[in-house]
Image: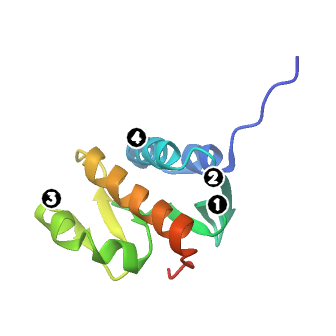
Amino acid sequence: MALSQPSPVDAYIEAAPVDARPTLRELAAILREAAPGATEAIKWRVPVWEGRRILYSLSAYKTHAAFMPTSTTLDGFRDEVEAAGLTTTAHMIQFPYGAPVPVDLVRRIAAAREEDVRVNDARWAG
């Protein structure tokens, strides 16, 4: 029986610093659930999920993980994200390592991006 290769996202997570891995694994699981038919790839040296368009990306930094659902998707949730105590930039949400991930919020943001692509063919806007 042939051994299966890890997905590119799983390989990225395993290569990340040990402190980053639990947060990255949790975020990746949420994103996979939100778009089960999406293709996982590495682009620009970070994991992305793609359907007809790039849906979102995930990356590891020194003290946090970043989820990038596009600025237009994030704009609809910015107040909720900030109320959850998370830092945002124009294009991403930062999740400090060791802090709880607001699973329901991330799930809703990912679903909104997936719907925007499916319904509106929305392009990746970083």
Q: Residue furthest left?
A: 83
Compared across the picture, whether 114 is left or right of 52 comes to left
Rendered location of residue 89, percent (x, y): 31, 79
Q: Quadrant of residue 41?
A: bottom right
Rendered location of residue 93, percent (x, y): 32, 67
Q: Residue at x 29, y 77 (%)?
A: 75
The span from disc 4 to disc 2 (Cα, nearest Å) is 22 Å
Q: Label 4, secondary structure: give it.
A: helix
Taking depth in this image into account, of 124 and 89 the one nearest to the observer is: 124
**Mark with earlier residue (3, 2):** 2
Which residue is the site of mark 2?
38
Compared across the picture, whether 41 is left or right of 89 comes to right
Residue type at tag 2: Ala
The span from disc 3 to disc 1 (Cα, nearest Å) is 29 Å
Q: Residue at x 63, y 47 (%)?
A: 37
**Residue contact at pointers 1 and 2, CB within 8 angstroms:** yes
**Mark with earlier residue (4, 2):** 4
Taking depth in this image into account, of 107 and 119 the one nearest to the observer is: 119
Q: Which label sits in the foreground, 4 or 3?
A: 3
Which residue is the site of mark 3?
84
**Mark with earlier residue (3, 1):** 1
Does residue 65 show up? no
Which residue is the site of mark 1?
51
Q: Residues within 10 Å of mark 2 (few under 14, many from 20)?
A: some
Which residue is the site of mark 4?
22
Q: Residue at x 51, y 82 (%)?
A: 125
